Amino acid sequence: MNDIMRRKCKELKCYCDVPYIEIAEYLEVKRSSFYSWLKGNYNFSPERLERLQEIVANL
């Protein structure tokens, strides 16, 4: 699921011009943590992934 959400976040930035920092702010994580997650350095918890899904759907 983390890999799917990484792809969706990248698509959101590419096609809708939504900056990663905006997604990180909505998700309430540090920008550096969000970038580390995007690179695959670690995975988000199921709860955080659920919140991220809501954010991506709304944006």
Image (cartoon, rainbow, N blue to C red):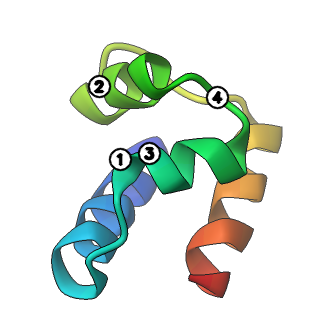
**Residue drawn where x is 40% and y is 27% of the image:** 37
Q: Residues within 10 Å of mark 3 (few under 14, many from 20)?
A: some
Callout 2: helix, strand or loop?
A: loop
- Residue beneath label 2, please? 40
The image quadrant that residue 38 belongs to is top left
Q: Amino acid at mark 1?
A: Asp
The image quadrant that residue 41 belongs to is top left
In front here: 29 or 48? 29
Q: Position of residue 42 (x, y in %)?
A: 43, 16
User: In the picture provided, is 54 more to the left or to the right than 16?
Assistant: right
The residues tagged by marks 1 and 4 sit, at their Cα atoms, a distance apart of 18 Å
- Residue beneath label 1, please? 3
Sequence-wise first label, 1 or 3:
1
Callout 3: helix, strand or loop?
A: helix
Sequence-wise first label, 2 or 4:
4
* CB within 8 Å, label 2 to label 4: no
User: In the picture provided, is 31 more to the left or to the right than 14?
Assistant: right
- Residue beneath label 3, please? 21
- Residue beneath label 4, please? 29
Callout 4: helix, strand or loop?
A: loop
Sequence-wise first label, 2 or 3:
3
